[in-house]
Image: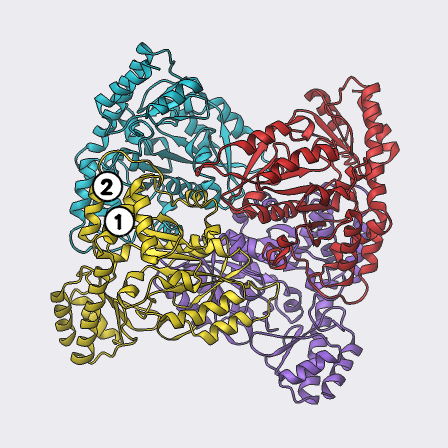
Chain colours: A purple, B red, C yellow, D cyan
């Protein structure tokens, strides 16, 4: 089976990440994040975001998101998110586990973007004791369906949420792809996001994500919080070094730009050379295609791993590692279906 | 500051671990643990333990222990452990967090080993509705104070606990050191341990530990459990490969044997060439020394990181990376205090 | 404002419940449920159900349901329920709180009854690590929309669920109304329900509900579980006595029969003497009516408390206390809208 | 068996409480605490405390304490309390359950009062990531061992705790007994207590306790919090009415004064007419006696329920219902041992 397009976590570490990890392996280092590599990687992230923030590195996006949300909402409150957001559909209820029962309110919207009217309607619901009222808004950038919010679109979601007292979380597992698509990272803090998950794994690192707390009050006793949650790395350099390598070399952005380009190439191939229609605009590194079960099965049988999503379309994802030739081979297989 | 003896997680990855990680980085791999490296690493662990078991790799010992305990005890029950066990003193209450309020009952005993009489007394307490009755026994091998349980000692703790219906967890963060000290790993399953944490980080890996479920009923839906707990690696090969490298090369045991030897050398130096008395038998890779605050402070000022423990002694830990010369330098510094 | 029809918890205790409570107040009683009143009330419930079971009295339906579900599903699992079930919409996420993140999967179906095909589809979903797989089925009898499952309908839901290994919970907050509508209580255990909440408050008691564990393995250490959950009554007689009074006198069933009769009278009045159409069959003690916002508002302004539900209809509920005259007054007000 | 002295929850409701409950039973009432009885009972409590506060009525002291603490401490933080406090020893770990793993740090001190030096030492511990740092101080008034803090003693505990940023909780399950012993209730708010549990059950009510939030910020969305925690009474009048009756009639204080007086009478009897020494000063309604196991057993055999506590002494508790004659009968039995 070929996993080139199965997900963006089937690729390995990008060379810059691996090299930095190997270099960081030398000698002794202070444990639990008090090392130099962690400090420098955090600095580079702050530079990219042009903002001050407390930053910690954790092992998984699931934990990063769930812990960030637990900072914003009590168990008797809820988080507003797109109904297809990763936190709603793919994390086995982690927000409820880390948040001790915190609720999720799924909002509609085309192609993974929350519909502002649906958000407003949810925010305007009168509060009653027997429901979990919203305390946080969670946004995914780029979205689960491969689209990218514009700054303006984000503003129209964040402003009403903040007016109602909600905190704002951004799931940036694929933030690099959004950046490569033109999204200006320095606007995240300015738009009022309180806590961002700055993605590593899907951008060419190993399993590492950064929790970026622009709102530093959220960072009070965060080291205790992370330790208790099993997310404190004793050998923290292995979480920070890949970020360091990717950011110093700019491979973080460049790999994402390559991934996005490969997705476009793949999308064009589908559009022009196959009967399969695109299900969503291709703005980042994923291509969603309307494909009947039979064709999907045959493609799998030909050795190409790809999965059907909740909207009924089949997803193909590109990464820093996707080869032009692989795109062409896949398209050829598709044409032959 | 020199961190050689501060902990056994200040050292980097051992060469065999790093090399395996670099090799595993090649090409695409199935995500979430369905890759070949994970499968082979699990096989090697089963071989070492001479037992069948379900095995999963997670990111931290804190999570591994807390999740294992949550399999054995309900929130309204408690876990019996040595009062100085890592789960009791150094994990920010992680068992209570992952176990939604599960209790910890700290038991006494010299040098980190549970006193069998104290265990029996706790097991014999009549059950009442307003206390959390014990549902699990947690053992640490080698112990927090650098001692190693004999098979016989373990049997005298495990048998009464199992008679009372308790499950048994073993925290093996330093299991390699116990093995290097002569403890027979193939006895763990036979003694009736239900779930073992097979240590990676302190044995020369990056941040990776294996949860070994001898009792396979505990593994029901364990992938959902781990995903929800933020402990499923999307790029799982980076958790498995270092184990693979360490176990194939036997560096897992050899590094621990080296660490233990260095600890003995250090202990002899303290005993023969310093006024500082050993606080505990030195059976694994840690040396605990009775040292007045003033001497401790001066040692720190000389650049040697070392920490005071709950029993009032100062701890020095050796690892696969500890150099003979470093031991000698430390001892020279100690003699000059 | 008149609360006669606002809910079935706006009425007080029925005379038989109050009298039993007053009688039980005499003298000293053992605390924490070890009293004679609790024992006798439990016996009467077992008689009604013609089944052996462990029984405990708790303070609220929310707690009773959430705790019962926490016996059946782990945090990384989910509970299947009608999307309009009380546990899904009116308990502020209590199942997730008591179940530490346990998921809820809302199923469709007309008038509050789960559609068997929707249930089968949910049970047939392939299990994946990143979703919470179903571990329990929750049924409400009588339903949130005032309908009553037949034995046959329940069998067609329970059987496939049990075949897939799910436990079964029944929310019987209005079980008395179901019984008064002809549902045979002795079938509950035979159908395979594992744990039942036997309703008190809506049947004329104060705040008290009984958790009935037909599956006695669920009762292991249940006293610890309830104490930890804040649901152990120190003066337990006040939870048991009202049940005793209602069951000895048969007021439990008779009050429900009266409530159902009043609902029918009200429904007939709506059907024959108003332009407002019934939204659901009237089989128990609630009447749901399609009523435009303006009419609803005017009815409220006339002093009649009644609330709009998630399906858009307006609910009127009858209880043991509902007077014929009140029904007539309400209908007159409705006719005058 | 006679339960007169077994606990102060073996007595029934005092006449004033029962009468108010019976009166409140008349007619319809708004559900979920929006009724007049709840409002008036809260007013009377505010009067007694001479302070503004948000007040809610819940079903059990265990829940009241655990929920109050969950307002003050995150899961990764801890609560400081006397090691013999009810929350530490008698609530099956409820603070950890409602607080999702929150820690308890037990402090020493004679006769149930926290030693100020021990508190200061705990507050002065340097914070580290791997321990749960204190976020709240919990005080019990009157204490678990029947003593009463003076205003001055409380000030010396509360001030250093607040200086370190801790919130303060007071468990007032026996607050009426403290008041009857001369403790000025109007000082509670002035001393800086953030949240008080104002006891009902042990003062002659049924199972009802009031959570008094002097710090109104703690009350944000408290109705959602309580509903989720299973502590919202649908028929709230039954929680509020007994308070109303007790407070309007002053039976709340008078019953406690009687209980204290009976305890003194009992204590004198032990001191003057038995070989059994008092273990603690008798300042409220409980008498603790040093009594060998054999004597204790014989007393039980004679039909007198009484229990041995963690300090090794045997406890006798008086209540509003304790009869002079019962004290004399018990003392006669004691003399005959």
Q: Position of residue B223 (x, y in %)?
A: 63, 59
Say whether disc 2 or disc 1 marks the residue closer to the N-terminus: 2
Q: Which mark is residue C244?
A: 1
Q: Position of residue A318 (x, y in %)?
A: 71, 72
Residue beneath disc 2? C24
Q: Nearer the viewer, residue A139 or C6?
A: C6
Q: Quadrant of the C terminus of chain D?
A: top left
Give the residue drawn at x 16%, y 54%: D27
- The answer to whether C152 appears left or right of B290 in the picture is left
Q: Which mark is residue D322?
A: none
Residue B307 lies, with reference to residue B194, above or below; the image says above
Q: Position of residue D309 (x, y in %)?
A: 43, 26
- The answer to whether B50 appears left or right of C190 in the picture is right
Marks 2/1 same chain: yes
- The answer to whether B81 appears left or right of C99 in the picture is right
User: Can residue C118 be seen here?
Assistant: yes
Q: Quadrant of the N terminus of chain D?
A: top left
Residue B211 lies, with reference to residue D132, above or below; the image says below
Q: Look at the numbered discs 2 and 1 and tell me whether their residues touch, using CB distance below 8 Å.
A: yes
Q: Chain of mark 1?
A: C
Give the residue drawn at x 84%, y 38%: B257
Quadrant hosting residue A147: bottom right
């Amino acid at each position: 089976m070929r996993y080139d397009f199965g997900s963006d976590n089937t690729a390995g570490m990008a060379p810059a990440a691996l090299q930095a990890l190997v270099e960081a392996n030398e000698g002794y280092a202070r444990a639990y994040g008090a090392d130099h590599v962690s400090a420098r990687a955090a600095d580079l992230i702050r530079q990219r975001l042009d903002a001050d923030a407390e930053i910690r590195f954790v092992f998984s996006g699931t934990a990063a998101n769930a812990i960030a949300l637990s900072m914003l909402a009590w168990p008797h409150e809820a988080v507003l998110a797109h109904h297809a957001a990763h936190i709603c559909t793919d994390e086995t209820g982690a927000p409820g586990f880390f948040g001790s029962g915190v609720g999720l309110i799924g909002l509609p919207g085309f192609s993974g973007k929350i519909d502002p009217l649906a958000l407003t309607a949810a925010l305007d619901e009168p509060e009653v004791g027997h429901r979990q009222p919203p305390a946080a808004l969670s946004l995914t950038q780029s979205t689960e369906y491969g689209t990218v919010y514009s700054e303006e679109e984000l503003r129209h979601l964040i402003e009403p949420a903040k007016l109602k007292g909600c905190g704002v979380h951004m799931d940036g597992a694929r933030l690099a792809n959004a950046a490569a698509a033109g999204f200006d990272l320095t606007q995240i803090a300015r738009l009022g996001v309180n806590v961002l998950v700055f993605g590593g794994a899907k951008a060419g690192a190993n399993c590492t994500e950064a929790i970026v707390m622009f709102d530093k009050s959220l960072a009070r006793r965060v080291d205790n919080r992370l330790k208790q949650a099993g997310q404190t790395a004793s050998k923290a350099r292995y979480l920070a070094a890949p970020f360091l390598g990717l950011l110093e070399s700019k491979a973080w952005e460049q790999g994402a730009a390559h991934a996005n380009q490969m997705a476009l190439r793949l999308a064009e191939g589908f559009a022009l050379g196959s009967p399969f229609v695109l299900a969503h605009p291709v703005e980042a590194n994923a291509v969603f295609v309307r494909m009947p079960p039979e064709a999907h099965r045959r493609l799998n049988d030909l050795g190409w791993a790809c999965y059907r999503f909740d909207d009924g379309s089949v997803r193909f994802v590109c990464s820093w590692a996707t080869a032009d030739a692989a795109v062409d081979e896949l398209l050829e297989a598709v044409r032959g279906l």
